[in-house]
Amino acid sequence: MQYRILTDSILVIHLLFILFVILGGFLAFYKRWIVWVHLPAVIWGVCIELFGWMCPLTPLENWLHYAGGQQGYEGGFIEHYLLPLVYPENLTRSIQIVLGLSVLVINTVVYCIWLSRSRQLKRKKHIKV
């Protein structure tokens, strides 16, 4: 049971990391320091997809899964709903490249908007002083 809880926890963390990589740039509009955490995460996520690397969370999930004596992901909410989001069934190399480029484009657009707004705010503050 402990291994199942650990496996599910790592899977949730993995999904949250993926969501952070894709959408975390929006958090920079609220907290500027997020940029310094988010950009390395984006670089890591894009490299994993474009170069076909394996995320270190994947072997950890698999090891915990098998250490707990589980034969396969079946049953619970985590496996049924979250697992297909993290590990799509028909994931091919071409799809990985498209995903990596999509993450890159999404975040480039978000950061261009963020930089533009940051510059506008600086100009407004400079004019008021």
Image: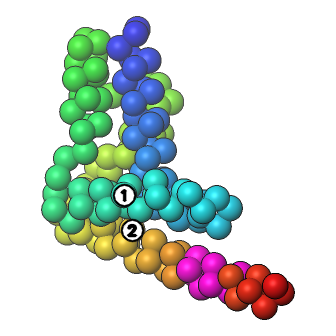
Give me the disc on residue 76.
none
Q: Is residue 71 left or right of residue 14?
A: left
Answer whether residue 115 is magenta in the image.
Answer: yes
Q: Residues within 10 Å of mark 1 (few under 14, many from 20)?
A: few
- Binning the other alpha carbons within 10 Å of mark 2 as few (below 14), some (14 to 19) or many (20 upward) gives many
Q: Is residue 96 above or below residue 3?
A: below
Question: Is-magenta flag for residue 29?
Answer: no
Q: Residue furthest front?
A: 129
Name the amino acid, label 2: Val
Viewer-nearest residue: 69 or 43: 43
Q: Decide: marks 1, 2 in contact (CB < 8 A)?
A: no
Residue 45 x, y percent position in the rendering = 32, 57
Name the foreground residue: 73 vs 40. 40
Residue occupying image coordinates x 26% and y 29%: 60
Which portion, as a residue range, is magenta? 113-121
- Residue 73: x, y in percent? 33, 28
Q: Residue at 35% of width from left, 14% of height from top?
A: 3
* Residue at 30% in and 56% down: 44
Q: Say which residue label 1 marks.
A: 40
Q: Secondary structure at mark 2?
A: helix
Residue 74 seen from this side: no
Give the foreground label among 1 and 2.
Answer: 1
Left or right: residue 11 versus residue 77 is: left
Which mark is first along the chain, 2 or 1?
A: 1
Dot 1: element = helix
Quadrant, the C terminus: bottom right
Residue where numbered disc 2 is placed: 103
Q: Position of residue 56 (x, y in %)?
A: 24, 39
Tell me the residue at 32%/46% (across/down). Answer: 87
State which quadrant residue 95 falls in: bottom left
